[in-house]
Image (cartoon, helix red, strand yellow):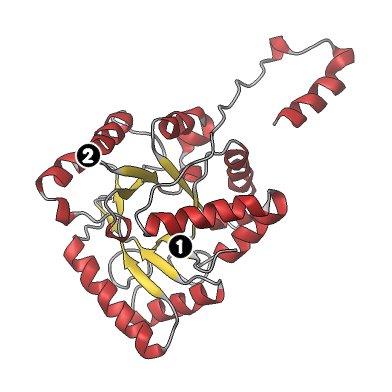
Amino acid sequence: MVDLLVDIHNHILFGLDDGAQNIDETARMARQAVKNGITHIIATPHHKNGKYDNPATVILSRVNEVNNLLQTLEIPLTVLPGMEIHLHGDIVKGLKQSPTDLLTLNQTNKYILIELPYSHIPHFTEEIFYELQLLGYVPVIAHAERNREFQKHPNQLYNLIQKGALAQITAASVTGVFGRELQKFSRRLFKHSLVHFIATDAHNTDRRGFELKSAYEYINLHFSEKHVRYLQENAIKLVNDLDFSVWQPSKFEKRTKFKDLPKPGNLVAFFSNKRKEE
């Protein structure tokens, strides 16, 4: 295991969005993060999602305030700046005209957390991701497993990753807190090497808390310690603005239609082989 444990996506900064609502809740979240073994977290308030706008200057000021609080309370946690930017058509324009208005993850030169709508994938997604990469940025797709279009057509996520994007999934989806279906889909993404980061997306200490330790334990049990190391080291490299090699993803095969099924006598063997392939 690595010495540092990094959470790249959460809402611990109080009073900025639907995460921590006051300074006491921020402190409770910090203590819960430490109990999960987390040493560093990138605070990522919502930005440009239609409800919350959090300019970089506001986030940087609140990060400084929270780190002072944690030092006073002797909570061994370091908060780093970032933001969860909702995908919109002016991201590239904003980065070109006023790059300091938007925050990358830990103010790195390249890693930028992008939130897609839950219900669909905007038609301009691939174009914007391409333009971001031309500027030297690497889009990190927030909670990719919760996008309904990816759930229906996971090869759309595969295509974005093949073209240079990275994907983060939520710890609570991995552990089953968000339901069995999201847990099953998360496992499918792991099997196809379409996951690069696990993060908490913590908003409070209750249902949307810091599940990182449990998530890594689940991955270690159902996949391997190698998977855990890969995910943890990716997060550390991101924080330090380093490049890293990703595992080669595999495409989802087209689901078999009823007309393609074998004769009745061979059904048991057919489905047994299909389960092995998956």
- What amino acid does circle 2 point to? Leu
- Dot 1 lies on which element? strand
- Dot 2 lies on which element? loop
In the rendering, at what x and y percent does residue 267 appear?
Answer: 84, 19
Vertical side of 102 occupied by 189: above or below: above
Q: Nearer the viewer, residue 268 or 98?
A: 98
**Name of the residue lying farthest toward the right:** 265
Question: In which quadrant will I find the N terminus?
Answer: bottom right
Vertical side of 201 occupied by 125: above or below: above
**Name of the residue lying farthest toward the left:** 97
Question: In which quadrant will I find the C terminus?
Answer: top right
Q: Residue at x 75, y 25 (%)?
A: 274
Q: Nearer the viewer, mark 2 or mark 1?
A: 2
Q: Residue at x 46, y 41 (%)?
A: 147
Q: Residue at x 22, y 61 (%)?
A: 54
Q: Which mark is residue 7?
A: 1
Q: Which residue is mark 2?
A: 135
Q: How packed is label 2: few (under 14 Cα within 10 Å), some, or many (20 or more)?
A: few
| Label 2 or label 1, whichever comes before in sequence order | 1
Image quadrant assignment for residue 131: top left
In the rendering, at what x and y percent does residue 246 appear?
Answer: 49, 41
Vertical side of 256 occupied by 2: above or below: below
Q: Residue at x 68, y 48 (%)?
A: 223
Image quadrant assignment for residue 16: bottom left
